[in-house]
Amino acid sequence: MSELADKAKDYINEKRNNDEEASQEDWLERVKSNVSDAWEDIKDKADEAWEKTKDAAEDVKAEWRKKTN
């Protein structure tokens, strides 16, 4: 949470430096967007891991069939 607080301070300073008004709604939209992007990255990595694991499981099954036939 302290990382998020630091990012909020950075957001406020950025707005101040650009002579813009910082708002909670704008900040929450920015956080929401970042979380959404992070979720997509996590989902992609999880899909890749699943496919690699599935492929490895199929390889093991094929090897087992070869040994038992």
Image (cartoon, helix red, strand yellow):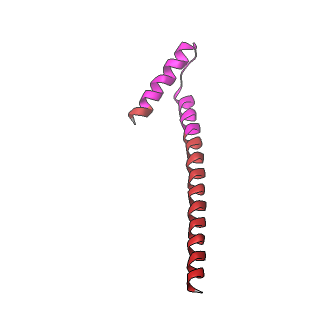
Residue 34 higher or lower than 19, as above or below: below
Residue drawn at (47%, 28%) of the image: 7
| Residue located farthest toward the left when viewing the structure as drawn | 2
Left or right relative to 16: residue 4: left
Residue at the spot 55% in from the left edge and 49% down from the top edge: 42
60, 45: nearer the viewer: 60
> Outermost residue toward the bottom?
69
Q: Secondary structure of the magenta portion, mostly? A: helix
Q: Give the camera-side residue of 47 and 27.
A: 47
Identify the residue shown where x is 60% and y is 65%: 55
Determine if the magenta segment contains residue 18: yes
Asked if residue 10 is among those painted magenta in the image, a careful observer would answer yes
Residue 30 lies, in percent from the top left, at: 57, 33
Residue drawn at x 56%, y 82% is 67
Q: Residue 17 appears at what percent x and percent y?
A: 54, 13
Q: Which residues are magenta?
A: 5-34
The one nearer the camera, 47 or 38, is 47
Q: Position of residue 5 (x, y in %)?
A: 42, 30
Name above or below for residue 4 compared with residue 49.
above
